[in-house]
Image (tube, rainbow, N blue to C red):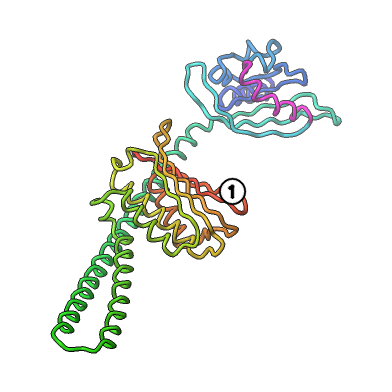
Amino acid sequence: MSSSIYNLDNMHRLVTSSVGAVLAYWDKDEVCRFANASYKEWMGKAPDEMIEKMTIAEVLGKELYSKQRPFIAKVLNGEKQSFEREFTLPNGEMRRAFVMYYPDIVENEVRGFIVHGIDMTPIKNLETKLLAQEKEKNNHILQSMIYSQEGEREALAVKLRDNISQTLSYCKIMLESRNKEKSSKTDDKVLLEILDQISMTVDELIAISSGLSSSVIVHFGLLTALEEHIASFAKTFAGDVDFNCSYEGIESISDKRKTSIFRIIQNFLLLLKSFKDCNRVNIVISHQHADNFLELQLRYHSHNKIDIYSREYSEIQNRVIFNNGSLIEMGEDGSKVLLIKLDILN
């Protein structure tokens, strides 16, 4: 039976030389006692160069060995190890591997360890591709939702402007009719009070209309729209509101980016309206030249926490995702900040 091609030695050599994974055995002194043919492709070393001749440090090289050393120390202490590692093949190609170290324990003594490394590159590439496809799909859905919201807001703004026009026309008719008729001072006083109330309502409707429509951004610029909106917010806010934009090229970015910035700040201020103890708000827009990202620092002084499940916060998140950005909430009791970065190029 020993001459058969199916004897254990032949089968052992066939299996270990055929698999794409790396297999090796290293003793407690980290000297190679076995290695399969895959080490030639992965590390540029053939088994006959390694076995009984090289340590794992010599095979891996100084830099890679320093990364592996903590895992080696643990496996030689009897602990099974597993981890992912990116490395470079001898031909310069980058690979991603999943590596496992199994301790060889005999009578409670660790004699060495077995290495089993699997090339995860094809799986990782597929995963990256699928994630990119899913992200693109989600971006299309998000874009449709945002455009739909803007369309609904614009339609509502038009209706409000129509109502404003009708209200003003009604006021004009009332004034003209009063001029033609003789009226008492009491009637005039009542009329003036009514007109004052109507005037206040008109101002509120104009403010709401401006907040709903993005056309003000297109016609007058983002900074003007923000300054007007923040000024309107400040009228009903008990504390101080500071706004500063240090990026001179803010008006040169696309209208959809400017609309997103406006909506983010708008929803941030809406979130703060319920905070009774909020006495100061700081809004800063700056440009990160290194990565060409626009940074929004939305700082507020309050012991309250922003409701992350609210519609306003959800819209902020959607705008950040839509602009390939990031959102981090930082700070302690009394002073907190939403740090937002938006990609202004893509």
* Residue 310 position (above or below residue 140): below
The answer to whether residue 181 is visible is yes
The answer to whether residue 130 is visible is no
Q: Which residue lies furthest to the left in this view?
A: 180
Q: Where is residue 330 in the image (x, y as percent from the top left)?
A: 56, 47
Question: 316 or 239: which is nearer to us?
Answer: 239
> Which residue is at 30% across, 56% downward?
147
Q: In this view, does 246 lie to the left or right of 156?
A: right
Three-letter code for the amino acid on which mark 1 is drawn: Gly
In the image, residue 61 lies in the stretch drawn in magenta: yes
* Residue 122 position (above or below residue 307): above
> Which residue is at 51% across, 61% downward?
309
Rendered-image quadrant of the C terminus = top left
* Residue 201 position (above or below residue 41): below
> Which residue is at 53% across, 58% downward?
279
| Magenta segment main secondary structure | helix
* Residue range highlighted in magenta: 60-77
Question: 185 or 6: which is nearer to us?
Answer: 185
Q: Name the residue under label 1.
A: 331
Q: Where is residue 141 in the image (x, y as percent from the top left)?
A: 35, 54
Q: Position of residue 84 (x, y in %)?
A: 59, 33
Mark 1 surroundings within 10 Å by alpha-carbon count, few (fewer than 14), some (14 through 19), many (20 or more): few
Q: In this view, does 292 lie to the left or right of 251?
A: right
Question: 104 or 189: which is nearer to us?
Answer: 189
Rendered-image quadrant of the N terminus = top right
